[in-house]
Amino acid sequence: MKYAVIKTGGKQYRVAEGETLTVEKINIEEGKPVEFDQVLLLVKDGQVEVGTPVLKAKVKGTVKDQAKDKKIRVSRFKAKTQYRRTVGHRQPVTVVRIEKIFG
């Protein structure tokens, strides 16, 4: 099995070919290709390559959707003053289908 660990949007994701991945928003239109070049780890047929800090490998995919993540609620509360505020937030995300891992 071949998989990689990539870094995008300040987070790290384990990806394999054919997977669908939800990452922080990338400004690329739907249906266009996207390339991740910050590959931190690559596993191919049981052999592990670890980058210091990154490898000369690439992960290519296709943008499937630009959407919003599920809503989170943020509450503020101060005791004894009857102060309560609740706001919601939906983070914009990009859905990517991983096509090929090169490395």
Image (tube, rainbow, N blue to C red):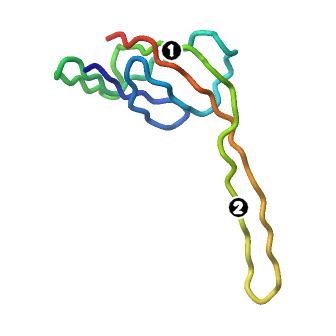
Q: Residues within 10 Å of mark 2 (few under 14, many from 20)?
A: few
Amino acid type, label 1: Gly
58 horizontally vs 10: left or right: left
> Which residue was labeled with disc 1?
61
Residue at left offset 68%, top offset 21%: 27
Closest to the observer, 57 or 29: 29
56 horizontally vs 32: left or right: left
Pick the quarter of the image with the N terminus.
top left
Q: From the top left corner, tell me how far across and down residue 48 is, in percent.
A: 20, 24
Q: Specify the farthest residue to the left.
A: 46
Pick the quarter of the image with the C terminus.
top left
> Which residue was labeled with disc 2?
74
Amino acid type, label 2: Val
Q: Residues within 10 Å of mark 1 (few under 14, many from 20)?
A: many
| Label located before the other in sequence (1 or 2) | 1
Closest to the observer, 3 or 40: 3
